Image (tube, rainbow, N blue to C red):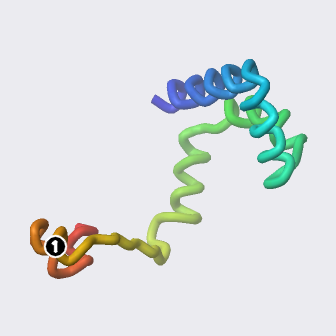
Amino acid sequence: MLETAKNQLVISQVYDEEKTSNYVHTVSFWWASASIDYYTTYIDNLKSVTRDDIKNYVNKYIKGKPMVAGILLSPDMQTKMGITDFNQLLK
């Protein structure tokens, strides 16, 4: 499943590079948010990710950490859905 996800990301990036308008937006995004080097080595770095890398990331940054969640409902929708406490949605 991890390999399938990696392949889908690679295919998506290669496909986006074939369309000039998408490619310009992609390159400018990575240039502004990370670096061109990050973008040009993305595929190789993506292929090197392992299950243990993902497990370590989740344990370090997500599992057991504080979170923020929100939901925007009209009073009518809240009544129709029977929601009286936001915490019941998180269970």
Tell me the quarter of the image containing the N terminus: top left
Left or right, 90 with reference to 14: left
Q: Which kind of residue does numbered mark 1 sit on?
A: Asp
Left or right, 37 with reference to 33: right
Instruction: Residue 71: name its quadrant.
Output: bottom left
Residue shown at 49%/73% (left/top)? 65
Q: Secondary structure at mark 1?
A: helix
Instruction: Residue 73: name its quadrant.
Output: bottom left
Of residue 55 and residue 32, the one placed in the foreground of this image is 32
Of residue 57 and residue 33, the one placed in the foreground of this image is 33
Residue 35 picture location, percent across and down: 87, 48
Residue shown at 79%/54% (left/top)? 33
Of residue 40 and residue 54, the one placed in the foreground of this image is 40
Left or right, 46 with reference to 73: right
Q: In the rendered image of this protein, does residue 62 appear above or below residue 48?
A: below
Residue 88 picture location, percent across and down: 20, 73
Tell me the quarter of the image containing the C terminus: bottom left
Instruction: Count residues near mark 1 (Cα–Cα under 10 Å), then give few for <14, some for 14-19, many for 20+.
Output: few
Residue 84 picture location, percent across and down: 15, 80
Residue 8 picture location, percent across and down: 56, 25
Q: Which residue corresponds to mark 1?
A: 76
